[in-house]
Image (tube, rainbow, N blue to C red):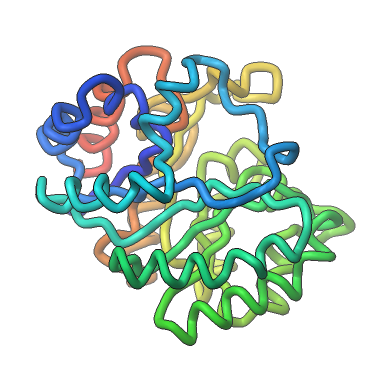
Amino acid sequence: MNVGANTFGLRTVFYGDFDRGLQQLKEAGITSLEVCVEFPSDPANMPDFPKLEGADVMASGIFTQENAPARIQAMRDAGFTVIGVHPMAFVSKPQEILDMIPLLISFAKENHIEYYASSPMKDADALQEFISAYKEASSRLAAEGITYMIHNHELEVKKINGRSGLDLLLSQCPDLKIELDVGWVTFAGEDPIELMEKYKDHLGVIHLKDLRADACEENRDSCFTAVGEGAIPLKEIIAKAKALGLGDHCLVIDQDASNGKMIDDVRTGVFNISK
């Protein structure tokens, strides 16, 4: 079984020795990597990431547009599949999404990227003014053979007047897909299996994040567990992904932080997924 990992959570694995980190991931059973790359955005809109490491450690998992191509090639040379990029661009205005489209297209073509997964980090009310921008972005990228996905946090699945941000976007953006983060779905108090079925026609990638049963806003930065060791229904999620016929690289570990060693949690996650 192919199991991928997003590089945001791998920052401590890569820090200090990128090549050694790749070797550890290979030994842990990871077969593909989804790369976080910085793109232009409004710094004032950047969320507060877990304050666990310094900027140099964070940069080990979030690459710049300048160094990302070399990192991607090194990953491929080491035997990993790299087809997805998570743009670390936290936009505050719809125009910022539109301005980014040419850059996303050129970066994808130059680096053989098949999909992007962006995190709005906005609820249904806030997403209202972004509908046309996401519609145009997903349409223009689709015309170039590139899939554009929304990666949810809890805000996008939180219902306001009976409707979530994902409901709103997908009802009006036919080319938009979802990278469903089942951990944040669970954090929001929703059922990941129900949402996988609900959004099956838009579902592209499953981000496997796992959380303690008592995960809440107060322990948000420390509630993560290895995949399969927390509250998400992992067995049912994998069975549903198979039943829906998602692609070979649809399962991506996206563990934001570890209360122990990240590489140990990755290894445990791969084992739990595989069994």
The answer to which of 54 and 174 lies nearer the viewer is 54
Residue 235 visible (yes or no):
no
Q: Please name the residue shown 41% across and 52% down the image.
A: 237
Q: Among all residues in the image, which is located at the extreme right?
A: 161
Residue 149 pos. (x, y %): 52, 64
Residue 55 in the figure: left or right of residue 150: left
Side of 72 relative to 47 (left or right): left
Foreground residue among 215 and 34: 34
**Whether residue 39 is situated above or below residue 19 in the rendered picture:** below
Q: Residue at x 67, y 40 (%)?
A: 188
Of 67 and 240, which appears nearest the observer?
67
Left or right, residue 43 beside residue 6: right
**Residue furthest front as drawn:** 66
Where's residue 103, x and y in %? 50, 66
Res 67 → quadrant = top left
In the image, 240 versus 46, the foreground residue is 46
- Toward the bottom, the furthest residue is 143
Q: Is residue 159 rendered to the left or right of residue 265? A: right
What residue is rendered at 63% in x and 17% in y?
A: 219
Q: Residue at x 47, y 15 (%)?
A: 53
Residue 133 appears at what percent x and percent y?
Answer: 71, 71
The percent position of residue 38, horizontal first and vertical second, equals 50, 46
Number of callouts? 0
Q: Residue 81 falls in which quadrant of the image?
A: bottom left
